Image (tube, rainbow, N blue to C red):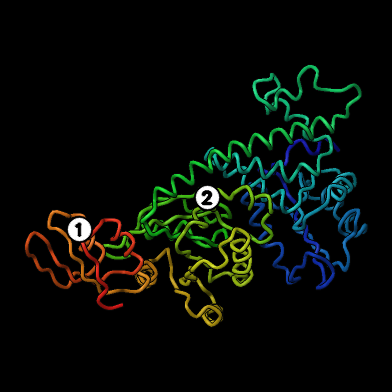
């Protein structure tokens, strides 16, 4: 079976999808059992480039420790593999190394689980150096405990000639007599994981410096389930020209653009990688640097696909990841997107009842974007305060700031100074103080 596992890629392969639906209380994974379990897996497989030729489900009370699904169903699966000339079987469940091995022995083709599929999609979509390193790290950390003589090719990938630290592992004098190939593979992977973490730590430092350079600017992070319309919203608000595709995980890399929700109010708007239910923990950990945009944001826009029947489950999945990365309590505006294609208005009404402060929009048609801008502006200001600011007439920075970011009510010039009455957002007070006005008096809070 070793030859079946030479690659985890599924591009253009003929795939059979399998979902084992556990009854409530039957185990750690539970599915609705309403037939929707394979809808998302189908979209994931398609996004990875596979051609879905068959879908296969079984309701189970307990997990078979050997093959996950029952023996009879495995035999049926083997028959379908032959009938549909499938190249790969993809489970919507997480399988143990033993279960994968036993299944491959019986059906005689490659078997992937949900986590491996998602990792494959991320690998195919990664474009920047940072994203590629993050995906490789996630793949290796996921695979390390599952090694079964399938990663010996990494000695050439990591530098068998000794050009890298990992390459030295396979060099002369590093193998004991009779050492198992599996142990060599594990050491290769362990060395590579250490290298990747070191490289990503350097990227993290640069990322932190980049974010620190944005101090004084209000930062808004767009988060949400994959394919909820985050990139479309970024384009609609900023004309960013980001790739938009009706496909899960169409974009991975973070993009940041300036956006002015109103005159004098400029914010940084960042799109982030989409979330998905049961997102592999390794990906969440590895993509911490990418998710820094959400972690360091002053405000999150949680984009929700209001037209998706599974919207509530998707909201729960996103909130779970946000909590995991420490953003569970961050101020958030829920954005009910795609209201222009909602088939049943009742579904939107339910969401609005559960999320009374949510804003309905269509990023595609621009419906509701003005209301969204007003909501962001209110968060940006943090409430208004009436100030009386005294500054020398030569301090043009103070005067320019107040005219750009506030509502000037009155100006008085005398003895080389200027006295300005202005309404200003509370969140902009710190920025004003950094410009060193002569005096700053709060007239009305």
For disc 2, the neighbor class at 10 Å (few under 14, some 14 to 19, many from 20) is: many
Q: Which mark is residue 177?
A: none
Note whether residue 335 is visible. no
In the image, residue 352 above or below residue 258: below
Residue at image point 27% right, 69% down: 424
- Residue in front for this viewpoint, 182 or 353: 182
Which residue is most to the left?
415
Q: Mark 1: which secondary structure?
A: helix
Please name whichever residue, 159 or 36, is drawn nearer the observer in this view of the structure.
159
Q: Is residue 158 left or right of residue 6?
A: left
Query: In the picture provided, is 277 more to the left or to the right than 18?
Result: left
Numbered label attached to residue 251: 2
349 sits left or right of 117 in the view = left
The quarter of the picture where residue 108 lies is top right
Q: Quadrant of the N terminus?
A: top right
Query: In which quadrant is the C terminus drawn?
Result: bottom left
Image x and y of residue 366, in percent: 38, 66
Q: Is residue 176 visible?
A: yes
Residue receiving disc 1: 400
Q: Nearer the viewer, residue 184 or 336?
A: 184
Point 58% across, 40% down: residue: 200
**Up-down: is 260 above or below 123?**
below
The mark nearer the N terminus, 1 or 2, is 2
Residue in the image at 83% along x and 51% along y: 96
Mark 1 crowd level (few <14, some 14–19, many ≥20, 10 Å Cα): few
Q: Position of residue 109 (x, y in %)?
A: 82, 43
Q: Is residue 45 left or right of residue 295?
A: right
């Amino acid at each position: 079976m070793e030859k079946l596992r030479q690659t985890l890629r599924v591009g253009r392969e003929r795939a059979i999808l399998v979902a084992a639906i556990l009854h409530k209380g039957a185990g750690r994974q539970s599915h609705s059992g309403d037939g929707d379990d394979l809808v998302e897996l189908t979209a994931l497989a398609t996004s990875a480039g596979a051609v879905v030729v068959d879908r296969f489900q079984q309701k189970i009370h307990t997990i078979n420790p050997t093959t996950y699904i029952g023996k009879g169903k495995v035999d049926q699966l083997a028959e379908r593999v032959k009938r549909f000339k499938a190249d790969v079987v993809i489970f919507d469940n997480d399988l143990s190394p033993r279960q994968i091995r036993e299944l491959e022995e019986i059906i005689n083709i490659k078997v992937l689980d949900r986590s491996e599929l998602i990792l494959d999609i991320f690998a195919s979509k990664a474009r920047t150096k940072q994203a590629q390193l993050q995906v490789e790290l996630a793949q290796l950390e996921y695979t390390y405990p599952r090694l079964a003589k399938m990663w010996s090719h990494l000695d050439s990938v990591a530098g068998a000639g000794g050009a890298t630290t990992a390459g030295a592992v396979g060099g002369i004098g590093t193998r004991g007599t009779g050492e198992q190939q599996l142990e060599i593979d594990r050491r290769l992977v362990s060395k590579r994981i250490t290298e990747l973490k070191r490289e990503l730590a350097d990227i993290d430092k640069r990322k932190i410096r980049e974010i620190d350079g944005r101090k004084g600017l209000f930062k808004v992070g767009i988060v949400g389930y994959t394919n909820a319309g985050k990139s479309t919203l970024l384009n609609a608000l900023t004309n960013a020209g980001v790739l938009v595709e009706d496909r899960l995980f169409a974009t991975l890399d973070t993009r940041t653009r300036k956006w002015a929700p109103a005159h004098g109010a400029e914010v940084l708007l960042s799109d982030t990688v989409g979330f998905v239910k049961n997102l592999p923990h390794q990906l969440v950990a590895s993509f911490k640097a990418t998710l820094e945009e959400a972690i360091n944001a002053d405000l999150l826009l949680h984009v929700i696909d209001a037209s998706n029947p599974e919207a509530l489950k998707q909201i729960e999945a996103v909130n779970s990841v946000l909590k995991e990365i420490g953003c569970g309590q961050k101020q958030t505006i829920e954005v009910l997107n795609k209201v222009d294609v909602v088939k049943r208005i009742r579904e939107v009404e339910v969401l609005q009842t559960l999320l009374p402060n949510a804003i309905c929009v269509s990023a595609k048609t621009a419906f509701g974007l003005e209301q969204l801008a007003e909501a962001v502006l209110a968060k940006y200001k943090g409430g208004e305060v009436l100030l009386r600011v005294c500054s020398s007439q030569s301090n043009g920075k103070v005067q320019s700031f107040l005219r750009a970011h506030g509502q000037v009510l009155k100006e008085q010039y005398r003895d080389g100074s200027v006295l300005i009455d202005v309404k200003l957002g509370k969140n902009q007070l710190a920025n004003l103080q950094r410009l060193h006005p002569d005096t700053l008096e709060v007239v009305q809070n």
